[in-house]
Image (spheres, coloured by chain):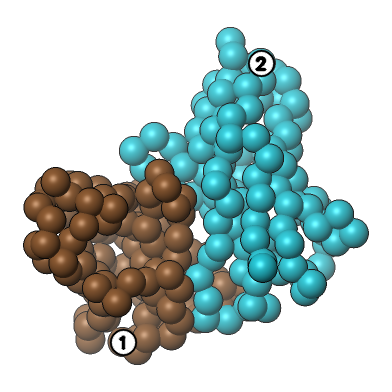
Chain colours: A brown, B cyan
């Protein structure tokens, strides 16, 4: 158990809909990262937040957005869902900003199925 | 373009045999390098990482990896495979030189252990 929690574990929805994925980082961690794992694209970095502010962006679509709240939990919002958005979405957390000094701890993921 | 390549989507070894999982990167600047393991239906767990210093890095569960700048490689090895090593292994890098960036992952290698 990494200490990172993600809810829900599974989510099934229809095309065109909007969903919100939630992540609670490990106690004391200030950085939250979001990743998408799909059969087509593999594991891709989406976005990072540090202490409530966006720090880095990866291959995140404009239909997707995220935020980190004062209590440091984070939410990933996916809208106008398409079949290709079906994937496993991981959240990871680390103490600080520096990947070279910090270890990213991954949650168990949320499996999103778009029908 | 900067990329990470894992040679072999599937690798099969006998229990007790040497495990060798290959990872190469393309970048003019040496990146920071990581190996993660993903067990079925679980998140990713850090095995080891190279940032600076000694190029032979030891990780958890008896794994180690060596950074070879001249070969742009970071292959993962374990002297004697155990049945519990069966999992998906991901090589990952940070190309930007550290800081607030996410990981770029290879496609993964599925390690199969034959009894």
Q: Quadrant of residue B98?
A: bottom right
Residue B14 circle label: 2
| Nearer-the-camera pick, A22 or A36 | A36
Q: Position of residue B7 (x, y in %)?
A: 68, 40
Q: Position of residue B78 (x, y in %)?
A: 71, 34
**Secondary element at image label 2:** strand
- Quick check: A70 left or right of A50? left
Q: Is residue A105 above or below residue B10?
A: below
Q: Total number of numbered labels? A: 2
The residue depicted at 43 percent of the width and 78 percent of the height is A57
The residue depicted at 32 percent of the width and 68 percent of the height is A25
Q: Is residue B58 above or below residue B87?
A: below
Residue B22 circle label: none
Q: Are marks 2 and 1 in contact (CB under 8 Å)?
A: no
- Quick check: B58 left or right of A17? right
User: Which subunit holds the residue at mark 1?
Assistant: A
The residue depicted at 58 percent of the width and 35 percent of the height is B9
Q: Is residue B12 above or below residue B74?
A: above
Q: Position of residue B14 (x, y in %)?
A: 66, 16
User: Which subunit holds the residue at mark 2?
Assistant: B
Q: Position of residue B72 (x, y in %)?
A: 81, 58
- As drawn, which residue projects farthest toward the right? B70
Q: Local crowd at mark 2 within 10 Å, few (<14), some, or many (≥20)?
A: some
- As drawn, which residue projects farthest toward the bottom? A53
Which residue is identified by label 1? A52
- Quick check: A91 left or right of A59? left
Mark yes or no: residue A27 visible.
no
The residue depicted at 26 percent of the width and 72 percent of the height is A64
Q: Is residue B47 above or below residue A92?
A: above
Residue at mark 2 to residue at mark 1: CA–CA distance:
48 Å
Q: Local crowd at mark 1 within 10 Å, few (<14), some, or many (≥20)?
A: some
């Amino acid at each position: 158990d990494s200490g990172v929690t993600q809810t829900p574990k599974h989510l099934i929805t229809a095309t065109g809909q909007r969903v919100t994925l939630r992540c609670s980082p490990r106690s004391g961690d200030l950085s939250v990262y979001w990743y998408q794992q799909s059969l087509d694209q593999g594991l891709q970095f989406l976005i990072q937040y540090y202490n409530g502010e966006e720090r880095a962006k990866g291959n995140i679509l404009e239909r997707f957005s995220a935020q980190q709240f004062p209590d440091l939990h984070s939410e990933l919002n996916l809208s106008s869902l398409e079949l290709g958005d079906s994937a496993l979405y991981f959240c990871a957390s680390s103490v600080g900003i520096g990947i070279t000094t910090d270890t990213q701890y991954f949650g168990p993921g949320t499996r999103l199925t778009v029908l | 373009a900067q990329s990470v390549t894992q040679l072999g989507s599937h690798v099969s070894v006998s229990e007790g045999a040497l495990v060798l999982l290959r990872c190469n990167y393309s970048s003019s600047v040496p990146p920071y390098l990581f190996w993660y393991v993903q067990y079925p239906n679980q998140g990713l767990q850090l095995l080891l990482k190279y940032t600076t210093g000694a190029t032979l890095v030891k990780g958890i569960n008896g794994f180690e990896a060596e950074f070879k700048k001249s070969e742009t490689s970071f292959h993962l090895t374990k002297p004697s495979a155990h049945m519990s090593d069966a999992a998906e292994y991901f090589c990952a890098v940070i190309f930007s030189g550290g800081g607030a960036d996410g990981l770029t992952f290879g496609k993964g290698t599925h390690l199969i252990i034959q009894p």
